[in-house]
Structure formats: C-alpha cells, structure tokens
Amino acid sequence: MISFKQHLAEGTGSPIASFDTRRSDYEIKVYKDGKGYYIDAGNFDMEAKNMAELKQKLKKAGADLNNPNFGRLK
C-alpha cells in the first residue's frame, strides 16, 4: 500500500515550480493537482485551492517567489 503523499505525487506528475526557502534549509515543490495545487516542502505538505492562496502559503513557508529554482507560477 502506498502513502497518501505518494498517491498525490503520482497523481500530480512533475512539479510545475520549485523554490528554496529564504534560509535555503529545504526545497519547496509545487504540483498542479486538479483544480488546485499541492505543495511538498519535505517536512510538511499543504494544498491550495487557487493561485492567490498558493502564493500566500508559499510566502508563509519562506519561499522567495521572485527567484524560483525552476518553473513559474502562472
């Protein structure tokens, strides 16, 4: 049996963007998940219903939205 996190990662495909935190202590990956977004930050996971909520949660997690490792938020 696979974990819920593995199920979501398999269902969402490749990340659409990736960010380091301000202190660069971990990487945050963003996946498109149906009508919303799935955020994998290693130690914790979050979901966002829309782009505004996604950006707010990424900022709270310490991501620099102006400097992604790859990808972009549309």
Image (tube, rainbow, N blue to C red):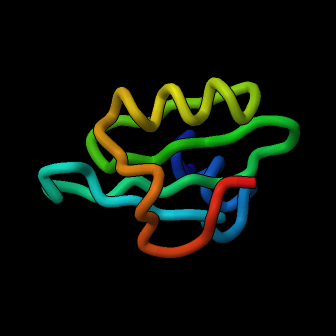
Residue 35's place in the image compared with 5, above or below, is above
Q: Quadrant of residue 50?
A: top right
Residue 68: where, in percent of width, then height? Answer: 45, 65
Q: Is residue 25 above or below residue 49?
A: below
The residue depicted at 36 percent of the width and 27 percent of the height is 60
Q: How many marks?
A: 0
Q: Quadrant of the C terminus?
A: bottom right
Q: Residue furthest front?
A: 66
Image coordinates of residue 8 in percent, x first then y, are 64, 48
Left or right: 51 in relation to 72: right
Picture coordinates of residue 39 (x, y %)? Answer: 52, 43
**Left/right of residue 58 with respect to residue 6 in the rendered view:** left
Residue 58 is left or right of residue 20, and the answer is right
Residue at 32% of width from left, 50% of height from top? 42
Question: Seen from this angle, which residue lies furthest bottom?
Answer: 70
Q: Name, please, the residue furthest toward the right.
A: 35
Residue at (47% x, 63% y) in the render:
18
Along the horizontal axis of the image, is 36 left or right of 66?
right
Front one among 59 and 29: 59
Q: Residue at x 63, y 24 (%)?
A: 53
| 20 in relation to 65, above or below | below
The picture places residue 1, in percent across and down from the top left corner, at 56, 50
